[in-house]
Amino acid sequence: MRKLAAAVSIITADSGGRRNGLTATAVMSLTAKPPRLVIAINKDASAYAVIVGSGSFCVNVLAAEQVDIARRFAGDVKGEERFALGHWGILETGSPVLEGAVTNFDCDLSETVDCGTHALLIGLVKRVLVNAQASPLLYADSQWRRLAEPAADNPTLQTAPTRKTG
């Protein structure tokens, strides 16, 4: 699984004035109409009960420059202390929204699917903010990475050959 590169997100929620969140790479688009996302979370994570209890969450897709925030939400710091880095606001659901993220998806929790140690949380997207100037933070092979655009005139850039089947 180390080789499966993914965008890095901070999943946040506020349940009765108690904020919490976690760093996640298990986030995917589910449907376009209505717009829904799925996040996979370990049920033992300190943020799990807050996210489920709030009935909403925000997926904050991190910009490449926000690696310190990714580390903070993935580390030993818990609860409200995680929000000491970054500038946070709120949108329609009341979930914390990180300013400067590539994208923020403010979601109502519509369904929870039990998957043993983890749960899949399906969110109905209520509002989206997009920062067109930001480049996403990626995680692959146990390393924080940034998306690099290849030069259009790079003669060493080649595409993989197409395989014929049958």
Image (spheres, helix red, strand yellow):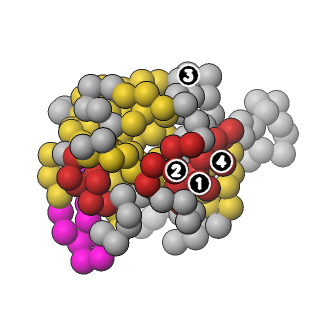
Q: Which residue is mark 3?
A: 132
Q: Which labelled disc corresponds to residue 67?
A: 4
- Contact, mark 4 vs mark 3 (Cβ under 8 Å): no
- Contact, mark 4 vs mark 1 (Cβ under 8 Å): no
Image side of residue 109 versus residue 128, left or right: left
- Contact, mark 1 vs mark 2 (Cβ under 8 Å): yes
Image side of residue 3 versus residue 14, left or right: right
Q: Which residue is mark 2?
A: 82
Decide which of 147, 133 is in the foreground and name it.
133
SS for tag 2? Answer: helix
Q: Crowdedness of circle 4 by 10 Å Cα count: few (<14), some, many (20+)?
A: some
Residue 153: in sight, yes or no? yes
SS for tag 4? Answer: helix
Image side of residue 75 versus residue 43, left or right: right
Q: Nearer the viewer, mark 3 or mark 2?
A: 2
Residue type of the residue flagged with mark 4: Val
Q: Is residue 166 above or below residue 159?
A: below
Compute the Cα span from label 3 to label 2. Answer: 26 Å
Q: Quadrant of the C terminus?
A: bottom left
Q: What secondary structure is the magenta-colored segment mainly?
A: strand
Per the rendered image, the range of residues in magenta is 113-123
Residue 5: in sight, yes or no? no
Compute the Cα span from label 4 to label 1. Answer: 9 Å
Q: Nearer the viewer, mark 4 or mark 3?
A: 4
Q: Is residue 91 above or below residue 144?
A: above
Residue type of the residue flagged with mark 2: Arg
- Contact, mark 3 vs mark 2 (Cβ under 8 Å): no
Compute the Cα span from label 4 to label 3. Answer: 18 Å
Q: Which residue is mark 1?
A: 72
Compute the Cα span from label 1 to label 3. Answer: 25 Å
Q: Nearer the viewer, mark 4 or mark 2?
A: 2
If you read the primary sequence from the N terminus, does the residue marked by circle 4 or circle 2 appear first? 4
